[in-house]
């Protein structure tokens, strides 16, 4: 069967990988001339399989007023004349309750662990080179209240409790000596030894290379934008491309991230997805940096910043700017990342070579992706992964392949249906 996948980020490529494994003829379409050029390009680098708590959290509500007054706040909001922004925000605020948070964690954890098993199997079988390391993750807390909440979350899940342990501040520094400068500010941390890290862009390029090999090489249509979908009699017949024209398909998968809502709206499919901009810096590790940087992936919970050691660089990522479709790199946000990295790990950061990036994470209000059929019998969507795209990509691709084949899914899929993508009781359609 000929299946087109729109989107050559990590989610689209993972979908293409799983579908070709099922024996399908796969065509990957992306408006960029290379794979992985949007949200996958320089993300945080952490594969956080057991740390999948959504941004929608009851604790965030009390912080919003103070964040609105701070230019360096972890979450920043700029109102737009866009009803979709306001509808998404209202739905997001509705999701900031303990029941929806625990529901999202309960849905995401099986998918995340499935993704981990697929990544490990892929690395073992194919030896992909993407700076992959099984170095564990430490989430550090500066606030006693959030540290207590994190311990309660572990206690609520047997799966989490079996892999995670709470450390006091001294134990955090003993585990990761690079945190010594932060010791006076720490209440403790949650350590998960089984977490991984890697370079998402490198994995995109590795998947592209391998997809083009073998008996059923995938076709890549890069540098050409899908402008519309040709549909009739309940089916998608073709993708209309700006340069190539009409591309006939048997099945179509939309994995186009934040661009997906506009593409699907003409078919009457309303996706509750809005872009949440994140930033990263990649700090080159010279001799001094290599000695001072962390070996374990670190997340600063209060600052909403992650630190992932990747071969010869330290990837630092964070922030959540709800500012519409603006992917520009804002100097003050980059300055905040540099300042926080320097304060955490040393003055060597000021002299290091640093590259910067910003990307639009396609987020649902609940933090759960949408993996479902919608709008036509042969139209599938795999979108809305927010900050967890790298972590959930392989599992999402596997789940999509199961659904398309009509077989029993490897993990429960009800939580990822389009109808369940917004908080319980919130079912008002979004306007295009």
Image (spheres, grey):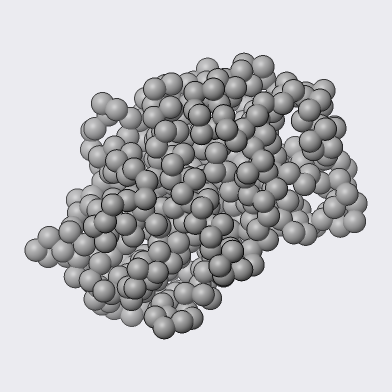
- In the rendering, at what x and y percent does residue 402 appear? 32, 57
Q: Residue furthest bottom?
A: 215
Does residue 375 appear left or right of residue 323 in this picture?
Answer: left
Q: Residue furthest right?
A: 288
Q: Residue at x 70, y 39 (%)?
A: 298
Q: Nearer the viewer, residue 310 or 329?
A: 310
Q: Residue furthest left?
A: 233
Q: Quadrant of residue 90?
A: top left
Q: Quadrant of residue 426?
A: top left
Residue 344 is at least partly visible in this image: no
Q: Nearer the viewer, residue 34 or 382?
A: 382
Disc tally is 0
Q: Residue at x 68, y 61 (%)?
A: 131
Q: Quadrant of residue 81?
A: top left
Residue 111 is at least partly visible in this image: yes
Q: Residue at x 29, y 27 (%)?
A: 424
- In the rendering, at what x and y percent does residue 339 appear? 77, 39
Q: Nearer the viewer, residue 47 or 429?
A: 47
- In the rendering, at what x and y percent does residue 229 appear? 24, 65
Q: Nearer the viewer, residue 214 or 64?
A: 214
Could you tell me which quadrant the N terminus lies in? bottom left
Q: Residue at x 86, y 45 (%)?
A: 292
Does residue 27 appear left or right of residue 238 in this picture?
Answer: right
């Amino acid at each position: 069967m000929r299946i087109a996948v729109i989107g050559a980020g990590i989610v689209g490529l993972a979908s293409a990988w799983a579908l070709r494994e099922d024996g399908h003829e796969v065509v990957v379409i992306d408006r960029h001339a290379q794979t992985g050029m949007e949200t996958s390009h320089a993300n945080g680098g952490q594969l956080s399989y057991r740390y999948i708590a959504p941004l929608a959290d009851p604790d965030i509500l009390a912080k919003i007023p103070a964040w609105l007054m701070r230019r360096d706040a972890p979450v920043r909001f700029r109102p737009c004349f866009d009803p979709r922004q306001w509808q998404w925000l209202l739905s997001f605020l509705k999701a900031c309750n303990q029941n929806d948070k625990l529901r999202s964690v309960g849905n995401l954890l099986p998918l995340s662990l499935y993704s981990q098993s697929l990544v490990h199997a892929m690395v073992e079988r194919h030896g992909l080179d993407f700076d992959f390391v099984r170095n564990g993750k430490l989430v550090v807390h500066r606030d006693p209240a959030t540290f207590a909440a994190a311990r309660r979350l572990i206690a609520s899940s047997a799966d989490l409790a079996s892999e995670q342990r709470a450390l006091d501040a001294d134990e955090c520094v003993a585990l990761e000596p690079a945190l010594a400068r932060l010791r006076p500010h720490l209440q403790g941390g949650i350590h998960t030894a089984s977490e991984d890290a890697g370079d998402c862009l490198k994995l995109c390029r590795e998947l592209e290379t391998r997809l083009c090999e073998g008996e059923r090489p995938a076709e890549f249509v890069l540098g050409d934008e899908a402008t519309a979908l040709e549909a009739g009699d309940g089916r998608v017949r073709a993708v209309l491309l700006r340069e190539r024209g009409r591309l006939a398909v048997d099945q179509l998968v939309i994995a186009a991230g934040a661009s997906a809502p506009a593409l699907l709206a003409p078919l009457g499919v309303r996706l509750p997805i809005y872009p949440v901009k994140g930033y990263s810096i990649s700090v080159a590790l010279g001799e001094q940096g290599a000695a001072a940087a962390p070996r374990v992936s670190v997340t600063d919970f209060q600052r909403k910043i992650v630190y992932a050691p990747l071969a010869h660089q330290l990837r630092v990522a964070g922030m959540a700017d709800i500012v519409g479709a603006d992917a520009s790199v804002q100097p003050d946000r980059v300055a905040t990342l540099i300042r926080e990295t320097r304060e955490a790990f040393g003055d060597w950061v000021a002299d290091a070579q640093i590259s910067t990036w910003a990307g639009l994470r396609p987020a649902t209000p609940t933090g759960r992706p949408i993996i479902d059929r919608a709008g036509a019998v042969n139209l599938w969507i795999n979108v809305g992964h927010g900050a967890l795209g790298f972590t959930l990509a392989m599992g999402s691709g596997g789940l999509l392949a199961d659904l398309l084949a009509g077989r029993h899914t490897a993990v429960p899929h009800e939580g990822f249906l389009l109808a369940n993508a917004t908080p319980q009781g919130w079912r008002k359609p979004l306007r295009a």
